[in-house]
Image: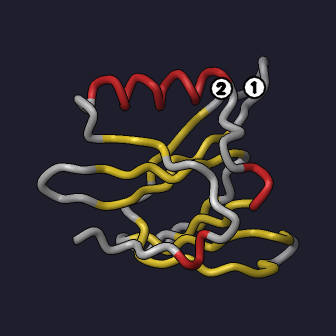
Amino acid sequence: MMTYIPDGWVVVKLSGTDPHYKIFGSWRGNWFTEPDRWKFNSGIVKCSYGPWNEMSEAYKFDGYSGSIYYCNKSSYGNLGLYNQSMLNNFIVKSDNLMEVLNDRDDWTTMDWIIK
């Protein structure tokens, strides 16, 4: 099981033959030692909220693959320019099958199963 704590994140809805939701996680690097990076999770299974380890006000997203994303409530949409441009490229290439959801007050009440 892999655990991720992104600097910024958004929830993405994927439509099509296998509709589901994913986390797009964003990590900011620095100019000298590492680049910015991003990652989609395998798909959201469930979400809970609470203090996790040293993090406060964080959502815990469980993925299909067993991975866990701890996402700080206040960092929604804070992707940085490079990672935002990467996400925008995916959206354009998806032919309108991918969309970023607006921030919510409580992600734990979301129904993650698309019917």
Please identify the residue farthest to the left as the structure is shown: 17
Compared to residue 84, the image places residue 109 above or below, namely below
The residue lying toward the viewer, choosing from 52 and 93, is: 93
What residue is rendered at 31% in x and 61% in y?
A: 20
Q: Give the residue type that dot 2 points to.
A: Pro
Q: Quadrant of residue 82?
A: top right
> Which element type, helix, strand or loop, lies under badge 2?
loop
Q: Quadrant of the C terminus?
A: bottom left
The residue lying toward the viewer, choosing from 32 and 110, is: 110
Q: Is residue 72 left or right of residue 12?
A: right
What residue is rendered at 63% in x and 73% in y?
A: 60
Q: Which mark is residue 35?
A: 2
Name the mark nearer the viewer: 2 or 1. Answer: 2
Q: Quadrant of residue 78?
A: top right
Q: Give the residue type that dot 1 points to.
A: Thr
Compared to residue 11, the image places residue 95 above or below, namely above
Residue tagged 1: 33
